Amino acid sequence: MLKLGILGLGEGRSTMSAALSSDRFTLVQVCDANQQLCKDRALEFGFQNWTTSYDDMLQNDEIDVIAIYTPDHLHFEHVKQALLHAKHVVCTKPFIDDLSNANELITLAEQSGKRVFVGQSSRFFEPAKRQRKDFEEGLIGDLITIESHYHADHRWFLEKEWSLKQSFKWLYGGLSHPTDFIRWYLPDIEEVMGYGMLSANGQRAGLKNQDTMHFIFKARDGRIARVSGAYTGPTQPAARDSGMSCILRGTEGASQADYHELRYSVTTSTGEEKIITWGDATLKHYFRFEGQSHHAGEYQNYLDYFADSIMNNFTAYPDLKEGIGTVALLQAMDESLETGLPVKIDGILKDYNISRASIGL
Ligand SMILES: NC(=O)c1ccc[n+]([C@@H]2O[C@H](COP(=O)([O-])OP(=O)(O)OC[C@H]3O[C@@H](n4cnc5c(N)ncnc54)[C@H](O)[C@@H]3O)[C@@H](O)[C@H]2O)c1
């Protein structure tokens, strides 16, 4: 059994639920700067070992792995501290939001010999897992193109004070999900371009950066892809249009994984058409709190996978390198929004003195 500490108990609530029902982890300690939240979580889960000081958790020799769910702009510092204290790390998305810190983390991870796993939760949702398995088994042939979106009415999120800071960008906070899908299937993106805008709702709410964006990508081998995100307005009924989807178009078939609805559809190489949904037991695994809030089931899946990777000595993906590669792509997307021009990923990597080899490309 590995010993876990959790930092940040907003979304970290899901990780508490996942850790407490895992047969690979013992939850040792949780931490949030907000004392009331610590008390609320203690009551909710009957788990009393909390602290408001991250330093306490870092000094706790019993802990093997720290899972981080603090605001986006703090991830770098919190990951760095965990590695400096010889802990394995799970960090939620977006991994970091500034590539100038990437080389330091690569070096630290190497020196510490500890593993870093990026919690790209959407990969670990049932329809996305099924889509990947079918793809790997050749059910849709070779990939031609991929399209993904994440559209959500996230006006409730703007009550969090950090969401209205200049440092918060939906590009990193939201589009990291569909952009990660693109890199899962087309790891080596050469160039990206896109447009973005701040919607009237976003402006009224006081958001500082774009909340509505469309991007197209070109991979080094010539294949193309697209993603979009819109975060400050209503969405269509979920039965018609999923909040998050990943569509693969292959040489012999096509497939679509939908988020929240637990729905997957595929046309296979034999021409068979299937629409698959999952029942109550699966719903209960994924959604453990009010409505469909939080991501406990996905976190359970990725925590257990990460534990297996440590115990059986294989790499759990996305790892640090893949995570930084996705941040490089997000940063290129950011630059394209600023300049209105296509941006090459190699140029971004060069600007930050990051070699392709060091991030597994
Ligand atoms: N699908 C997903 O994987 C998913 C979903 C939601 C949120 N997230 C990510 O989780 C992170 C947190 O989001 P959230 O919605 O829970 O935000 P939140 O503001 O509700 O929670 C963050 C918590 O971190 C605590 N905190 C901040 N600095 C701290 C410090 N130095 N020491 C101890 N505690 C500290 C805050 O008190 C707060 O309770 C974000 O990076 C977000 O992108 C991921």
Image: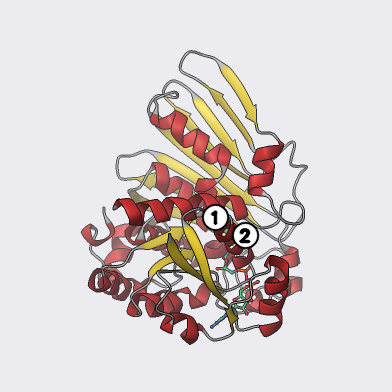
Asked whether the viewer can see residue 324, the reply is no
Name the side, left or right, on which 184 lies relative to 361. right
Name the side, left or right, on which 73 lies relative to 238. left
* Element type at mark 1: helix
* Element type at mark 2: helix
User: x and y percent of residue 302 in the render?
Assistant: 48, 52
Q: Which residue corresponds to mark 1?
A: 299
Q: Residues within 10 Å of mark 1 (few under 14, many from 20)?
A: many
User: x and y percent of residue 87 in the render?
Assistant: 37, 72
* Amino acid of disc 1: Tyr
Marks 2/1 in contact by CB < 8 Å: the verdict is yes
* Amino acid of disc 2: Ser
Q: Nearer the viewer, residue 31 or 291?
A: 31
Under 8 Å from ligand 1: the CB of mark 1? Answer: yes
Q: Quadrant of residue 203?
A: bottom right
Q: Residue at x 62, y 72 (%)?
A: 9
